[in-house]
Image (spheres, rainbow, N blue to C red):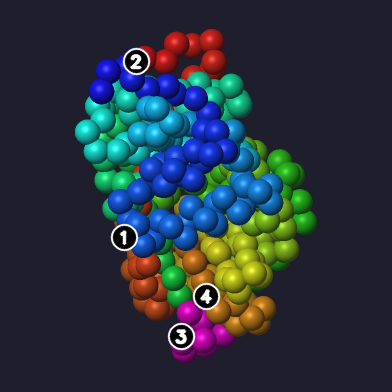
Amino acid sequence: MDRQDFEIDRAQPQHQGAALWLATGGRSRHVNRGRVTALLAAEKEGKVSFDGLVAATNRSRVIGAIWCLNQPGKIATIWGPGLISGVSDTLADQLIKRVLKFAQQAGNHLMQSLIGLENPNAGEHLARIGFRHVTRLDQLHAFPAEIATPPPSSLLTFLPCDDFRKPAFEQLVANTYEGSLDCPEIDGLRQIEDVLTGYHATSGHDTRHWYLVQLAGQTIGVVILAHHTANHQLELIYFGLLPPFRQRGLGKEVIRFLLHLARQIGCQSILTGVDERNTPAMALYHQFGFIPSDSKELFLLPLPPLNVAVA
């Protein structure tokens, strides 16, 4: 299909469903129908924005699409690109470049894409434009009611974080990243305050379950959780210990605390994500009954300032 045979623009209301279908993986019909319906409803409720939903149309038919969602913490997430059969890959390149500009204009410092089996070609398209494949992220679930573990011992103390914007807390979190096996490629791509802003949004702007981890009165790490009350789920957003306190069995105490807390507040499940290369963390979670429920390939692209050309 020649370039003049299609137009690329922000998806119009009558094209949004089809654009979402392609961008989020139109091949999985039975799964994707519910996903698209939920996204359309969320947009009407103001929960998500379609400002970055871009469609390529040919005679009012959507033939390609990509969705870029600006998120707190100066990061943008993209879904797609997705193309109908028979469309040239050059259209995918144009769609990606369109949302790159959109993300830059919003002041983002980083773009990410989490690609699953529903849209396997998206990674190849992104790589051509400069995205780097980093790793596979595994999503793990646990069901506290089904896991028999003793309550956490008194070895560690978990103190609520009173203000995540304090420089001391920012420095603590940054120090726990040192030597981390979870996506170390991300370190330094964003300011720590932007990372914490992203965590804050994921936790529903509620820090009641953000904790300082202390050992004998010394702060040695952090646990950042989100309580998703609508589906009775506790999400482990981030857990990190300072380097001198790793490999000492303290991670087991943190997981015991997590399971105990989940039962206390009535959560039916616990969710977390782990870099597949982080074998110590994987072993720890599996030891406590966490099981894989999904996996995605992570692609990243640092964004230069808007006045710097993008190849």
Viewer-nearest of labels 4 and 2? Answer: 2
Q: Which mark is residue 147?
A: 3
Local crowd size for mark 4, using a 10 Å CA cut-off: few (<14), some (14–19), many (≥20): many
Q: SS of the residue at dot 2?
A: helix
Q: Nearer the viewer, mark 4 or mark 3?
A: 4
| Residue position marked by numbered label 1 in the rendering | 279
Q: CA distance from mark 2 to mark 1?
A: 50 Å
Please say whether residue 50 is visible from this viewpoint.
Answer: yes
Q: Position of residue 216 (x, y in %)?
A: 64, 68
Residue bearing the label numbered 2: 4
Q: Position of residue 8 (x, y in %)?
A: 44, 23
Q: Main secondary structure of the magenta part?
A: loop
- Tell me the crowding category of disc 3: few under 14, some 14 to 19, or many 20 or more residues within 10 angstroms, Cα based: few
Amino acid of disc 3: Ile
Q: Secondary structure at mark 3?
A: loop
Look at the numbered discs 4 and 3 and tell me whether their residues touch, using CB distance below 8 Å: no
Q: Is residue 186 magenta?
A: no
Q: Residue at x 44, y 43 (%)?
A: 18
CA separation in Å, label 3 and label 2: 59 Å
Q: Percent from the top left, x then y, of residue 35? A: 47, 56
Say whether disc 1 or disc 4 marks the residue closer to the N-terminus: 4
Residue corresponding to mark 4:
269
